[in-house]
Image (tube, grey):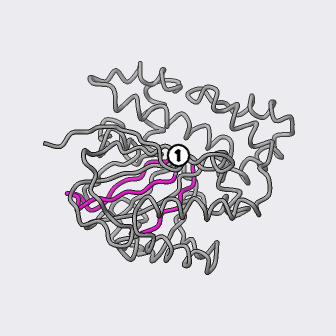
Amino acid sequence: MNRTITHALRLDLRRWILPWQQDAPQSSAASCGTSTEPMFLSLQPSAPLNAFVESLWYSERGALPHTRERSLPTGCAHIVVPLLQDHLIRYEGANDKGARRLRGPIVQGPSDRFGVRGTEGPSAVIGVQFKPGGAAAFFGGALPHLRNRTELLEDLWGPAAQALHEQLKSAGSPQRALMCLRDHLLRRLRQAPPPDPLATCAIEVFGQDPARARVLPAQHAAGCAPAQFIRRFEAAVGLTPKRYARVLRFGVLLPALVRCGPRDWADIAVGAGYFDQSHLIREFRQMAGMPPGQYVPVHADRPTHVALQVR
């Protein structure tokens, strides 16, 4: 019988986390995804990359009982690279009939509303989760234009995106593929401009109490006029300060919904920083596309993924 375990090991002075399975199958980045047992590897990089990247990850699974998932907003940018399948599927809405089939690596911009991704068939993908403000070092001024959008990585990085794709597919194992991806990001980081200190300061202030993040204290800490603060923050993060604060509050709410049994919405609303129950429900509908009472994540460790039944 399958059971969830967590174990860690030291490899190349980095920490690997395998939270979803017992006895992970030996698989190759060049030929993977045939096992029905899911596998997830996560690598937290060391300095200097850890200032920009939350994690590098590899995910492998068999076919799922559902063919679409809602991806709930995190406020962070992501890179996703298909290794088994030749394309990734995205939809404009929950019941959209027309799929976007994106061939090759993609960039998912910072979001403050849900997206919909196709989950048909077995899958093996590798990717990057950037920290808030971290993606600007790799995509420059494109971040505000990527808000709530998914685009081909090739459109931003040119032929280097396809070259990286081929290197990852031929790496020989998930671990070597993750190291290859890490090394590529490190090379790009050497040529990147330094982070905007204003945005770095504001992100730190927002993060002190995410449930009660407010724009005015962050602006005062940054020490500039409102218009300049909004412009520079959005350029670095991809979201305006107000949108970012809403996503932070939403990020506090989701784990609370996963943990709770019988739901006292008034208490949950106060604990997650909402004014009242109606405020929580309204914002949840706007960001998740459904009422909070219908929220059931595919896994407790993946609160931003919700199976979607297409009407």
- Foreground: 262 or 173? 173
| Label 1 Cα neighbours within 10 Å, binned few <14 / some 14-19 / many ≥20 | few
From where the camera sits, is residue 159 visible? yes
Query: What's the magenta region?
Result: 56-82
Q: Residue at x 35, y 71 (%)?
A: 84
Q: Quadrant of residue 19?
A: top left
Q: Which residue is mark 1?
A: 14
Residue 70 forms part of the magenta stretch:
yes
Is residue 231 at least partly visible in the picture? no
Vertical position of residue 223 compared to residue 79: above or below: above
Q: Nearer the viewer, residue 287 or 156?
A: 156
As drawn, is 233 to the left or to the right of 10?
A: right
Give the image location of residue 61, x and y in percent. Answer: 28, 59
Secondary structure beneath dot 1 equals: strand
Measured along the vertical axis of the image, is residue 14 above or below residue 98?
A: above
Which quadrant of the rendered structure holds the N terminus?
A: top left
Quadrant where the C terminus is found in the figure: bottom left
